Amino acid sequence: MSETVLLMGPLLPATMSELDSNYTVHRFWESDDPDALLDSIADTCTGIVTDGGRGAQAEVMQRLPNVGVVSVFGVGVDAVDLDYCKTRNIRVGNTPDVLSDDVADLAVALALATCRKMVTADSYVREGRWPIDGAMPLTVRMTGKRAGIYGMGSIGDSLAQRLSGFDMNIAYCNRREKTGSVYRFVPSLQQLAREVDFLFVTAAATADTVGSVNAAVLDALGAEGYLINVARGTLVDENALLERLQTSSIAGAGLDVFAEEPKVPTAFYELDNVVMQPHNASGTRETRTAMGRLMLDNLAAFFDGRELLTQVV
């Protein structure tokens, strides 16, 4: 008899198909009566599959006392109640590393699109302004500038490799200095922001990092500085960021993430110094397939009595 698994939200069709082939899967987001669904599987459900945005709250896990694993399709686990999982000895796995290259790629793309005003330039051509108004105003180069990376994990490392190709002077802020790193460690985020032209946010969302890119950090970045966020929207004080973009107190921002996704403050829409993406940094066929594979492998490892391949808790 197959294990019973609660799937919190839709994943890639191929991933869900394999999940269905190996387990008895109940789809939480499709249920007309979630309470009744949880009651019906309370005795049999042994695993939860979710993504980084939906996570797994204690309120759900409390209704499923036999759950032993939460397998997350994504690197972020801030939406999973890790404290509850620790108290109940529930294993939690995620999908790090396999998405680092694509997230780093998009961070570079957002930086270039922002400082070179690529979205504005595209509209300039499409609207027929070029032959009428002439050349666009000059933009800002990225090559040779100073880059600061906030969060030097796998994504930060991949990003640093790419920024090196732009001959950028690279420094980073992390919980602790990384042994053997060739990049300059700066212990204070505000100091890092003050010393760079581009501040890239790649840190995990934790109690210590949420809201850490605050007004003081943005002011330290200054009127010539660019903020690029491919981590979590909650790491940035969104109101402070909006105010500084509106007043050109920072030069611009490239944002893949927002505080209350998929809701985005409409004030961002009116700004030409921000480039936005719908939380899509890992959104390639190759990476999402690899994430699905690792999520399934973590699940299988637990049910086989093995350690998870990428265990968080």
Image: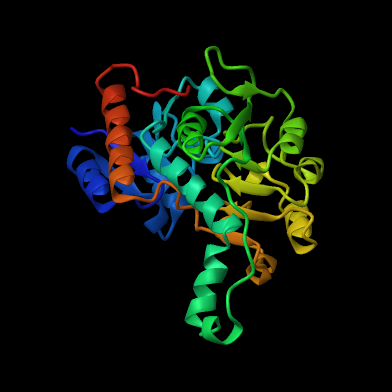
Quick one: which residue is furthest to the top in this view? 179
Specify whether 290 is left or right of 107.
left
Give the residue displayed 55% in from the left and 12% down from the top. 179
Q: Quadrant of the N terminus?
A: top left
Quick check: 122 above or below 47? below
Specify whether 176 is left or right of 101.
right
In the foreground, 265 or 102: 102
In the image, residue 144 lies at what x, y percent? Answer: 58, 40
Specify the quadrant of the image occupied by residue 183.
Answer: top right
Quick check: 45 above or below 13? above
In the foreground, 270 or 34: 270
In the image, residue 29 lies at what x, y percent? Answer: 41, 55
Specify whether 294 is left or right of 187.
left
Give the residue displayed 79% in from the left and 55% down from the top. 249
Tally of numbered discs = 0
In the image, residue 254 lies at what x, y percent? Answer: 59, 53
Q: Is residue 15 visible?
A: yes
Give the residue displayed 60% in from the left and 32% down from the top. 169
Give the residue displayed 40% in from the left and 38% down from the top. 101
Q: Is residue 67 visible?
A: no
In the foreground, 283 or 308: 283
Specify the quadrant of the image occupied by residue 115.
Answer: bottom right
- Colour mode of the rendering: rainbow
Specify the quadrant of the image occupied by residue 293.
Answer: top left
In the image, residue 13 lies at what x, y percent? Answer: 25, 53
